[in-house]
Image (cartoon, grey):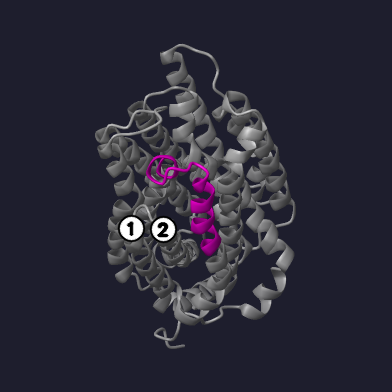
Amino acid sequence: MDINSKANVNISANSENNKVGFGEKVSYGFGNLAGNLLLTTANTFISFFYTDIAGIAVATVGFILLAGRILDGVADLAMGAIVDKTKTKFGKARPWLLWLAIPYAVSLILMFTAPDLSSNGKIIYAFITYIFGMLMFTGTATPYNVLSALISQDSNVRSQLSSYRSMFGFLGALILSIITMPLVKTFGDGKRGWLLLAVVYGIASAVLYFMCFKNTKERVAAPVDNADFSLKDGLKTLFRNKYWAMIVASIVIIFISAGLGGVNVYYAQYVLGNPNLVGVIGTASFLPIIAGSFLAGPVLTRFGKRNTALGGIILTIVGSIPMALAPTNITMIIAGLVIKGLGSAGFLVSAFAMLGDTVEYGQWKHGIRIEGLTFAAEGFAEKVGTGLGGAVLGAILGLGGYIGGQATQSASAIMAMKVSFAYAPIAASILTAVLLYFYDLDRIYPKIIAELKERNK
């Protein structure tokens, strides 16, 4: 087989595609919907909740988000190692969705509770519950991500799973951006409104994780010669995987940009002058990603993962330009967000599928198959990226002189919101495009799979 052939070569299509049905793909997508009930809600609203509901200073909030994400990022690696060593009748990844569904729901509720405490007490409570929430997200997200590599080894099936993952994840993000603030008001606004909202989201997330666990199946077993490697060996092997490093670095950068999305609620209220527009911004951001995720499968098959990801990043840059040039024109903002959203879908669907392919590359190159650590590092990248994004947002707003709870803000604070909303994401996209330019695993992946199958015989 020519290793320079197109990246849409379908490895073991006859056997794998027939095993993974529509219902299983949808159920797999439910897991990301559950994850977004916590992560998207936190990314979008936790800064506002801490500053305007709990009464914590914006600079302190930035520190909480950064410290929490970095500490939790370390836990990602530990959870990856745990998943790699897990052996149950349900498999190595699925059982964690069952075991942690309820603790996950509890952590979401605690995160959006604002008890009447002293100033220091509020900070300590916010830090502890934020850490707990992120740890529960790690405990479910890491095995959930690993599951895609265990459901199938077929590159096209993985692309389809990645599409469903993105579709349901961003569908959840879209719904949350539209209904969260109205639901808070319906539930009584203020502390009570946020608490009841978290209860509803928590219950929904637990049910979705149970469904994902019940309706999926692990099919890909570890190779017969897979050594009982240590965490040190696994990490050493992982950091020698150049393609994994490229993807993880790209994910960190893109999620720094995603972490800046916390500016949306401020932007709608203070720059556009209408807090209800946060729903419009969310819809314009996430609806194109959902549509793009649905279309990504055929595009990936036709052009390959790397080209789709790179094209998507270029689109995000193009979409950000009108937002930077016309920061108060809602029509231009919506148009830019639509273009940017389509581009984001191309990158996100591709990057997740590409990360799964790096598992086989590492096994082929170094003789160790480490799904858990590979995908745990993806979670680490997301969390550190969004944590850095939240910290950068807090720093930019702080430098701009933002003061929470005021009806109006200074000109410098407004400018800080504009920088966070448009200019910084453009810089992040340019850096990501440079990294993706050097990724060429698509070209040799068919050869890798063929050689691995021969070894396992």
Q: Nearer the viewer, residue 408 or 362?
A: 408
Residue picked out by circle 1: 326
Say if mark 2 contacts mark 1, CB within 8 Å. Answer: yes
Range of residues picked out in magenta:
266-289
Residue 162 in view of the camera: yes
Dot 2, how many residues are within 10 Å of its Cα: few (below 14), some (14-19), or many (20+)? many
Residue 86 in view of the camera: no
Magenta-colored stretch includes residue 316: no
Is 136 placed above or below 147 here?
Answer: above
What quarter of the picture does the C terminus occupy? Answer: bottom right
Distance of label 2 from label 1 (alpha carbons): 7 Å
Residue picked out by circle 2: 333
Q: Residue at x 69, y 68 (%)?
A: 20
Q: Nearer the viewer, residue 446 or 26?
A: 26
Provide the secondary structure element on which disc 1 rests. loop
Residue 103 in the image: state x and y as whole percent.
64, 33
Q: Is residue 377 left or right of residue 9?
A: left
Image mark count? 2
Provide the secondary structure element on which disc 2 rests. helix
Residue 434 in the image: state x and y as whole percent.
27, 65
Q: Nearer the viewer, residue 209 or 58?
A: 58
Tell me which secondary structure the magenta stretch mostly adopts: helix
